[in-house]
Image: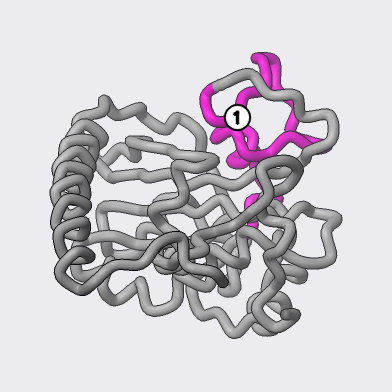
Amino acid sequence: MTPKNTATREEWLIDRRILLEKEKAHTREKDAISEARRSLPWVKIEEDYVFETDAGIATLRELFGENSQLIVYHFMFGQDWERGCKSCSFWADSFEGLPPHLNARDISFIAVSRAPMSKLAPFKKRMGWSFTWVSSALNAFNADFHVGFGPGQLRDEPVTYNFREFDSDDVDEMSGTSVFVIGDDGNIYHTYSTYGRGLDITNAAYSYVDMTPKGRHEPAEGNPMAWVRHHDSY
């Protein structure tokens, strides 16, 4: 790799301090966005969703465990797929070790996919993951949160992804993250969802890659994540 430019340590420090001011401004803006996110109105969940888990059937409320907040990663793994999405698996490698820290802040964390537990469990074992992963094959959860578009996911309203109408002819699953809370009134509410590049902040590997000289160096056209493999397949 050929350097774009070189400098003395003193010259480098001048440029680094200029960049630091931009980074600090970005951090302050991120804090403001996070506050705006927390200020979004809540939407009451009216459906009685039930999920397939390692321990049997569980309701959405039961997935909260002892916490009042729940983060759900919508993991792309269709009912007829043989393995989980490579990109979602790339994200999932960042999930290990999260639960104790999130639990300490009154947050539970799970992944949800349309595939049955008979497929999720062996793939989870293969990848060496320990986070909670449940199946939404018994309900319309994926469709309701705009990440499921395949058979059995038909809706009367226009199909949308990332809050825009979406041509789903060649896609049956997409990824995302949704947040739920149990209110003081005992009801479950949906407070936030993010999709597409909005998920970048949850990927630890990308955050480190973005610090390097080459950066992501992904293609501008086609699938930018074509390089990604399951971590046991590189």
* Residue 84 spot, x, y in % from top left: 72, 64
Quarter where residue 104 is shown:
bottom left
* Residue 217 spot, x, y in % from top left: 59, 57
Viewport quadrant of the N terminus: bottom right
Viewport quadrant of the C terminus: bottom right
Q: Is residue 136 shown left or right of residue 72?
A: right
Scheme of image coloration: one colour
Count of all numbered marks drawn on residues in the image: 1
* Residue 45 spot, x, y in % from top left: 42, 33
Q: Would you call the spot at circle 1 few (<14 residues within 10 Å), some (14-19), or many (20 or more)?
A: many
Q: Amino acid at mark 1?
A: Tyr
172 up-or-down from 77: above or below: above
x 78%, y 67%: residue: 83
61 up-or-down from 37: above or below: below
Please report the bounds of the magenta region as a residue range: 135-163
Q: Is residue 51 magenta?
A: no
Where is mark 1, residue-wise? 161
What kind of element bears circle 1? strand
x 25%, y 53%: residue: 68
Q: Is residue 142 magenta?
A: yes
Q: Is residue 70 shown left or right of residue 205?
A: left
Q: Which secondary structure dominates the residues rendered in magenta?
A: loop
x 65%, y 14%: residue: 157
| Foreground residue among 214 and 44 | 214
* Residue 53 spot, x, y in % from top left: 59, 66
